[in-house]
Amino acid sequence: MNVRITVKRITQYDDLMKEYENPIEHTCSMKLNQEFISVNGECPEGFCDSAWDSVKPFVKELASGGGNFYDGWMKNPKSAMISCNDGFRPVSFLLETV
């Protein structure tokens, strides 16, 4: 099965960045409502490697026909809401089988 990955929220914690992060030139290039399609549980082209590390187990489970994570956590059992692991600017993704 294919899994659609949709950017649903982009957050930035300026206070944490100011206090703890070294300045960097390039951060996240995700755009709100941007969509990616994972074919057979593979990382979509152009998808952030770090974000993929966070969503990969859920994408692979959905792609193999699984779902219903955490005993009914999502209204749609064939979906998941997962955030990337960036503590300064997390991005939330909706994963759903298509």
Image (tube, rainbow, N blue to C red):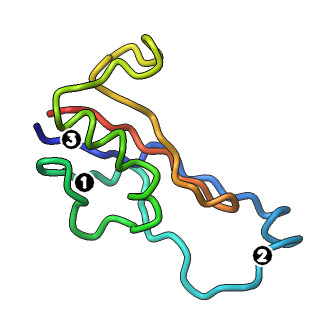
Question: Which mark is first along the chain, 2 or 1?
Answer: 2
Instruction: Name, please, the residue furthest toward the right.
Output: 19
Vertical comparison of 72 with 56: above or below? above
Circle 3 packing at 10 Å, graded few (<14), some (14-19), many (20+), is: many
Q: Distance between the residues labelled 3 and 1?
A: 8 Å
Task: From the image, tell me which residue sits under label 2.
Answer: 21
Q: Which residue is drawn at 62% across and 53% down?
A: 11
Check whether the beta carbons of the residues at disc 2 and disc 3 lie within 8 A of each other. no
Task: Provide residue 95's location: percent of width, then percent of height.
Answer: 33, 38
Task: Give the quarter of the image for residue 42.
Answer: bottom left
Q: Residue at x 39, y 31 (%)?
A: 80
**55 with respect to 62 (left or right):** right
Q: How far apart are marks 2 and 3 (CA)?
A: 33 Å
Give SS at disc 1. Answer: strand
**11 with respect to 3 (left or right):** right
Question: Which mark is first along the chain, 1 or 3?
Answer: 3
Which quadrant holds the C terminus? top left
State the mark number for residue 3. 3
Give SS at disc 2. Answer: loop
Question: Which mark is first along the chain, 3 or 2?
Answer: 3
Task: Provide residue 78's location: percent of width, then percent of height.
Answer: 27, 23
Vertical comparison of 66 with 71: above or below? below
Relative depth, front residue between 7 and 85: 85
State the mark number for residue 72. none
Task: From the image, tell me which residue sits under label 1.
Answer: 36
Q: Residue at x 35, y 50 (%)?
A: 56
- Residue type of the residue flagged with mark 3: Val
